[in-house]
Image (spheres, rainbow, N blue to C red):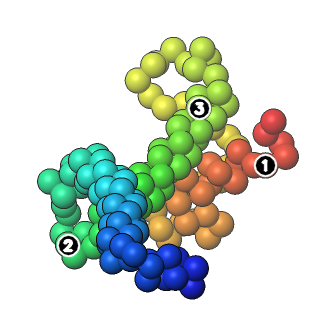
Amino acid sequence: MKPEELKLMSEGDGMACMAKAELREVLVGIERLESFKQAYMEWSDKTEWVQDSVESGELGKHRADAIRIRFEQLKAENESLRKDAERYRWIKKESNLSDYEDCYSLPMVHAWEYKPGPELNEQFPSLDEAIDHAISSPENP
């Protein structure tokens, strides 16, 4: 407390004034804590699904960390699926299916030299990498 407040409290009914001031401080603190409690309860309600669907690698982790890990996994999976879709669309565009009468056979895309089997591929270790190279090749718009 400030010196002037102490002086006022020492005159007359100082103890009652001091108790009121302290009570006001306590009430302000309680109001502040109530807003934190409300925010926590909302967070808890909205993230209960994480607790209910915990996975083995998440045991002992904070809910926010578990949500971040799941988000990053889903983001990586989404990126992988988008890349696969891009490859598919590119093969579909390059192959020009209208040239093929047999709709059950995969048309040959002549943009890369990829042979199935690990020992045959010196340039590309996977078909995906061969397609990625063909997509980025200057000969393919």
Helix, strand or loop at mark 3: helix
Name the residue located 48 percent from the left edge and 52 percent from the top edge.
Answer: 75
| Mark seen at residue 89 | 3
Residue 63 is situated, as x and y percent measured from the top left of the image, at: 30, 63
Q: Residues within 10 Å of mark 3 (few under 14, many from 20)?
A: few
Q: CA distance from mark 3 to mark 2?
A: 40 Å
Q: Are marks 1 and 2 in contact (CB under 8 Å)?
A: no
According to the image, label 2 marks what residue?
59
Residue 62 is situated, as x and y percent measured from the top left of the image, at: 30, 69
According to the image, label 1 marks what residue?
137
Query: Which kind of residue does numbered mark 1 sit on?
Result: Ser
Judged by depth in the image, the label closer to the viewer, 3 or 2, is 2
Query: Which kind of residue does numbered mark 3 sit on?
Result: Arg
Q: Is residue 69 left or right of residue 8?
A: left
On the image, which quarter does residue 16 sit in? bottom left
Helix, strand or loop at mark 2: loop
For the question of whether residue 8 can be seen, the reply is: yes
For the view shown, which residue lies furthest in the front direction?
12
